[in-house]
Image (cartoon, grey):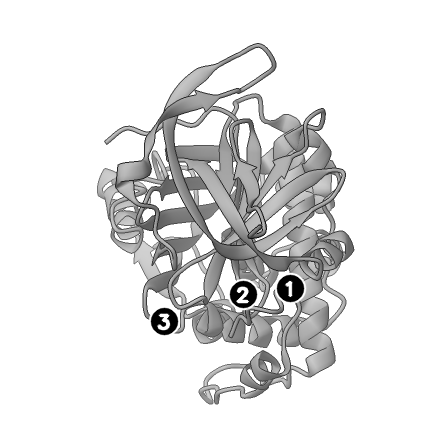
Amino acid sequence: IYGMKSISVFLTGTVLSLFLACTSVEDAVVVEDPIVTPKSAESIVEANNNFAFAFIKEINAAEKEPNFMVSPVSLSLALGMAYNGSQEETKKAFEHVLQYDVSRDIVNQFNKNLMDALASSQTGSVLEIANSIWIDELFPVKDSFTLLNQTYYNAEVRNLDFLAPASTDIINQWVSDKTHEKIPTIINETKGYVLFLINALYFNANWKYQFDETYTQKRPFYPAPQQEVFVDMMSMTEDLKWYENELFSSVILPYEGEKFSMVVLLPQPGKTTHDVVGALNGAQWKEWQQQYQEEEVAVTLPKFKMSYENKLNDELINMGLGIAFTARANFSDISSIPILISFVLQKTFIDVKEEGTEAAAVTVIGFETTAIPSEPMPQFFTADRPFVYFIQDNATGSICFAGKVGSPEYEE
């Protein structure tokens, strides 16, 4: 569990023992239980965070809107299911993008343990994870593929008539249910597709130190130089983890139970969120995390609520997964009929207020058949200009949500 003196993004010995305690796999599955060693677990955590930061950089470079929020862990879990169906050069492309240097069996067992760890019960916080596979009833999918994802991703498997309009409603209802209605829809139609892989996350946690609503007031926020808007700003003063360097100042806001926390990075005057995002990588993040010290901090943070969606084809192609979107894609472990990824879409929702944070994310991968062609003064942290934030699981270091606030809005 997260310790007040350490927020290392790598696994502690306690958590490593959790990952090594592999549960048994049913005899029907075609692979035996692999052993996740401490070295391989640490390697995958580092790979996951490097993937997360590479993904965030792609989003940040392409996004024109002032606000965005994505879920690296939702995307990596959805891609992990697709990875189980890939072969040859397509499989290598997945490994390159996800930065895996261990066997697929090890990755699967790690992801299973990771989902168990993320979703473990904790007073004051909840993170729910759901995966599903939706198959056109006329499209043949190999049992080995569905069994693999049922075993390691706890994926629900459903066959539907994709030509029937009701199939779209059924899939969207599943998404709505799994996100507690925060994301009511994810697809517009099923016609023309043969397979959907979906991951859904739902997060709800109270702050360990809640903001007093009586201190919330309209205060200025500066989206850009010479621009000023008035938004609801929350305030409190507490002993919190604090760090600053020439690039940013940062505070860590723990959630109740301290299983999760929000890490807020505020660029220094003269710096921008682009500067901060540009400096992100796994090694740098680990180094920063080791520098935080507990200090009294007067925090001022805007309330914000937002929904976001992004078709991620271009970002994933730029990251090296281009072959999966072409007729050269090899998903022969899914079906003997050639298929390719038609689209990867992610929708997210977040509500940050005095009591805590509620967030949700859904990632869908759509497949189609291949077409040939005196007292110490407190530190002051006033987030009155664009900032970036991350919600991480403190035990594993996994980044569950990441975003930028350039123009906070909050509607009841």
Residue 147 shows in this picture: no
Bin the neighbour count of mark 2 within 10 Å (Cα to Cα): few under 14, some 14-19, many 20 and up: many
Bin the neighbour count of mark 3 within 10 Å (Cα to Cα): few under 14, some 14-19, many 20 and up: some
Q: Is residue 86 left or right of residue 65?
A: right
Q: Quadrant of residue 82?
A: bottom right
Residue nearer the viewer, 34 or 245: 245
- Distance between mark 1 and mark 2 Cα atoms: 7 Å
Q: Which residue is mark 2?
A: 394
Is residue 43 shown above or below 286?
Answer: below
Residue nearer the viewer, 295 or 324: 295
Residue 34 shows in this picture: yes
Residue nearer the viewer, 343 or 201: 201
- Distance between mark 1 and mark 3 Cα atoms: 19 Å
Q: Earlier in the sequence, mark 1 or mark 2?
A: 1
Q: Which residue is mark 3?
A: 122
Residue type at numbered disc 1: Val
Residue type at numbered disc 2: Asn
